[in-house]
Image (spheres, helix red, strand yellow):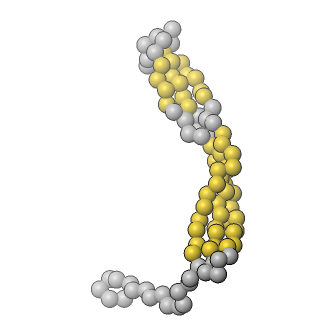
Amino acid sequence: MEGGTVKIALTGTRRKDEIEIVTSEKARVEPPQKIQTTPELPPGEEEITEGIPGGTVEVWRIIHHHDGNQTEERLHVDSYYPYPSVVKRGER
């Protein structure tokens, strides 16, 4: 350690393969809609907060070897719940 700085050196043979990380959306779930009445808005007026879609995503590692071949490896599958849209309506 010199003057509060840590120096790290990586040594070895440089890899000639190219590595690519790819994501693939497998399913999409549109956000549900919640409707709320509120005295905060004038009657008949609406305020909308957009939701966020959910779905399932795959993540792959693709290794492009220097000899022209490639290797594909699925790293993981992630699922996300949608976040609902909210429609606030003024009470009548």
Which residue shows up at 53% across the image and 18% down it?
37
The front one of 85 and 90 is: 85
Q: Residue furthest top?
A: 92
The front one of 66 and 92 is: 66
Q: Position of residue 64 (x, y in %)?
A: 62, 74
Q: Is residue 29 left or right of residue 46?
A: right
The N terminus appears in which quarter of the rendering?
bottom left
Which residue shows up at 58% across the image and 72% down it?
19
Q: Residue furthest front?
A: 68
Q: Position of residue 4 (x, y in %)?
A: 32, 83
Does residue 80 appear anywhere in the picture?
yes
The image quadrant of residue 71 is bottom right
Q: Is residue 11 left or right of residue 20?
A: left
The front one of 51 and 73 is: 73
Q: Is residue 49 left or right of residue 80?
A: left
Which residue shows up at 29% across the image and 86% down it?
3
